[in-house]
Amino acid sequence: MEISKQKEAGLMIVSINGRLDTTNYSVLDKELDSLVNDGENNILVDCADMDYISSSGLRVFLVYLKKTKANGGKVMLCNMQNMIKEVFSVSGFTSLFDIYNSREEAIAANS
């Protein structure tokens, strides 16, 4: 898994490339922890190139949703592949997160 980040329109955009699973979820955890500790509380995760997520990955998203909400922010998701959308739907996470079809849609909705 590779993670890249960039700031755009007041959002910290975190892009995930590859699998998010039990072998590497801690990498995302550390990255998000660093962002939140630096005051970034509006995070958009671009899932366009994420092709798998395990329960460990879901847990990381949930932890940082709670942390950002406590600081008046939020974690949003965009560009989810159908399989990833299904995992979020089955787990009930679609009701917890703002999920957008594209990065542009997410930015427009939050500006």
Image: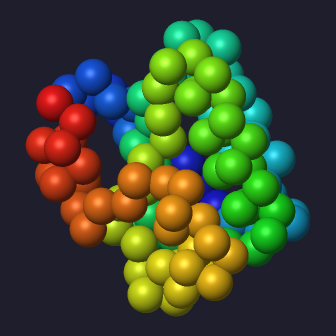
State the image coordinates of residue 98 (x, y, percent, origin top left). 40, 53
Q: Foreground residue, 95 or 60?
A: 95
State the image coordinates of residue 72 (x, y, percent, origin top left). 50, 19
Query: Is residue 4 at all visible to an observer of this figure?
Result: no
Q: Foreground residue, 107 or 27?
A: 107
Q: Foreground residue, 78 or 2?
A: 78
Q: Which quadrant of the structure image shows residue 102?
A: bottom left
Q: Quadrant of the N terminus?
A: bottom right
State the image coordinates of residue 18 (x, y, percent, origin top left). 58, 70
Q: Which quadrant of the structure image shows residue 105?
A: bottom left
Query: Is residue 82 at all visible to an observer of this figure?
Result: yes
Q: Is residue 93 left or right of residue 62?
A: left
Which residue lies at the image location 18% right of the left edge and 44% below the top edge? 109
Number of numbered discs visible in the structure rendering: 0
Q: Which quadrant of the structure image shows residue 31?
A: top right
Q: Residue furthest right?
A: 23
State the image coordinates of residue 100 (x, y, percent, origin top left). 30, 61
Q: Quadrant of the C terminus?
A: top left
Q: How is the image coloured?
A: rainbow
Q: Is residue 53 left or right of residue 108?
A: right
Which residue lies at the image location 60% right of the left edge and 65% below the top edge? 93
Which residue lies at the image location 77% right of the left edge and 56% below the top edge? 59
Which residue lies at the image location 34% right of the left edge and 67% below the top edge? 79
In the rendered view, tell whether residue 10 sits above or below residue 19. above
